[in-house]
Image: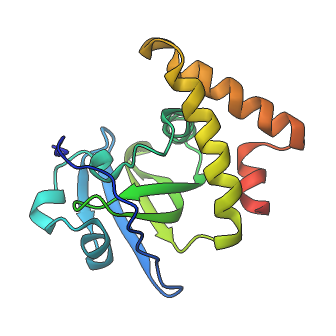
């Protein structure tokens, strides 16, 4: 379970170009495996991560709408690519460019594999500003309306660019 007393800080850890954070989850989002790089950046021991919900590293600056988009894409059998801000156990943060894909067994989705790498630093200004606007929309409405409100802001931003989310992140 994610500790509720973690306070986000302004301390950033920047991934190195040759590092990859790798993890797998079951279909419910519970972590089934992690690599040492994940353990290092998250600040949690492997035993704390295994069987925990993957949102144990979710930073509050990443909008709920983005995670909704990721889960919808994955449930449909697609791969999700996106920028995510994660939070370490000490409250620090680290940005990643994530590629999450379904894993199959017997023709059905049995889990998910996520490979995160260093994001393009030039893209983070655009992403951080967009996510700030999406989160602001999510906070202006009751919780049950947060995701649709955030998606409306995201959709408007993407429409202005004439791009899908996947196209945007690929071009940043």
Name the quarter where the C terminus is drawn.
Answer: bottom right
Quarter of the picture holding the N terminus: top left
154 over 40 or under it: above or below = above
* Count of numbered tags: 0
52 vs 60, left or right, is: left
Task: Give the left or right position of residue 76, taking residue 14 as reference.
Answer: right
Q: Quick check: 153 above or below 166?
A: above
Residue at (22, 60) in percent of width and height = 89
Instruction: Identify which residue is drawn at 48% across, 67% down.
Output: 116
Give x and y (percent) for residue 137: 60, 25
104 to 19, vertically: above or below: above
Residue placed most toward the observer, 164 or 41: 41
Residue 16 at x, y percent in the picture: 48, 85
Q: Residue furthest left?
A: 47
Residue 73 position by quadrant = top right
Q: Nearer the viewer, residue 151 or 34?
A: 151
Residue lying at the far bottom of the rendered structure: 18
Q: Which residue occupies the extreme front position in the image?
A: 10
| Residue 21 drawn at (x, y percent) | 39, 71
In the rendered view, does 51 fall on the left or right side of 140?
left
Q: Which corner quadrant of the image does residue 72 belong to?
A: top right
Left or right: where 108 falls relative to 80: left
Question: How is the structure coloured here?
Answer: rainbow
Q: Residue at x 78, y 52 (%)?
A: 167
Viewer-nearest residue: 49 or 72: 49
Residue 103 location, x and y as percent?
A: 42, 53
């Amino acid at each position: 379970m994610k500790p509720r007393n973690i306070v986000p800080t302004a301390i950033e850890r920047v991934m190195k170009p040759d590092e990859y954070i790798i993890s797998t989850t079951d279909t419910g989002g519970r972590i089934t495996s992690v690599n040492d790089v994940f353990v290092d950046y998250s600040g949690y021991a492997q035993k704390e991560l295994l069987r925990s919900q993957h949102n144990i590293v979710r930073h509050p600056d990443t909008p709920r709408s983005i995670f909704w988009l990721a889960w919808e894409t994955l449930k449909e059998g697609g791969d999700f690519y996106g920028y995510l801000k994660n939070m370490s156990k000490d409250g620090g943060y680290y940005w990643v460019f994530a590629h999450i894909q379904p894993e199959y067994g017997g023709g059905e989705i049995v889990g998910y594999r996520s490979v995160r790498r260093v994001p393009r630093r030039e893209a983070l200004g655009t992403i951080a500003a967009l996510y700030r606007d999406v989160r602001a929309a999510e906070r202006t409405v009751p919780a049950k309306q947060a995701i649709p409100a955030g998606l409306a802001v995201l959709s408007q931003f993407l429409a202005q660019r004439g791009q899908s989310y996947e196209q945007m992140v690929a071009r940043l």
